[in-house]
Amino acid sequence: MALQIINAGPNPVDIAEQIRRAIAQALPEATIEVRPQGPGHFEIDVTDAAFVGKPRVRQQQLVYGAIAHLMSGPNPPVHAVDRLDCRVP
């Protein structure tokens, strides 16, 4: 009997685009790059003037706040952000 995967979950490229759109909604002037790293795992780079004068933790909170809905619930499509870089232009 062969192993059969019935539901491998959502396409990581589609989820990456959902992440990008959610961040863009919260930070409309941002330059955003989202890279899938594996099922449910992503790397995110965000550059935005909104980060000026904010400590790194606050910068990251702005990004995580934008994608919180993708990381919550019984079966969230985003399990982990493996790397989050927030930069000032």
Image: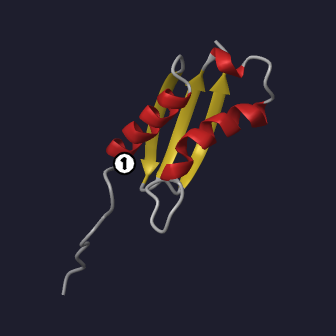
Q: Position of residue 6 (x, y in %)?
A: 24, 72
Q: Position of residue 41 (x, y in %)?
A: 49, 51
In the rendered structure, the answer to whether residue 22 lies left or right of residue 61 reads left
Q: Which color scheme did the rendering employ for the protein?
A: secondary structure
Q: Quadrant of the C terminus?
A: top right
Q: Position of residue 53 (x, y in %)?
A: 80, 18
* Above or below for 57 versus 37: above
Secondary structure state at the residue bearing disc 1? helix
* Above or below for 59 versus 10: above
Residue sticking out furthest to the top? 89
Identify residue for label 1.
Answer: 12
Q: Quadrant of residue 88?
A: top right
Residue sticking out furthest to the bottom? 1
Tell me which amino acid carries mark 1. Pro
* Above or below for 34 versus 28: below
At 56% from the left and 30% from the top, the residue drawn is 45
At 65% from the left and 35% from the top, the residue drawn is 62
In the rendered structure, the answer to whether residue 85 lies left or right of residue 67 reads right
Q: Quadrant of residue 9?
A: bottom left
Query: In this view of the protein, which residue sits in the foreground, 63 or 13?
Result: 63
Q: Position of residue 70 (x, y in %)?
A: 48, 51
Q: Residues within 10 Å of mark 1 (few under 14, many from 20)?
A: some
Residue sticking out furthest to the left? 1
* Above or below for 39 versus 24: below
At 71% from the left and 31% from the top, the residue drawn is 59
In the rendered structure, the answer to whether residue 39 lies left or right of residue 56 reads left
Q: Quadrant of the N terminus?
A: bottom left
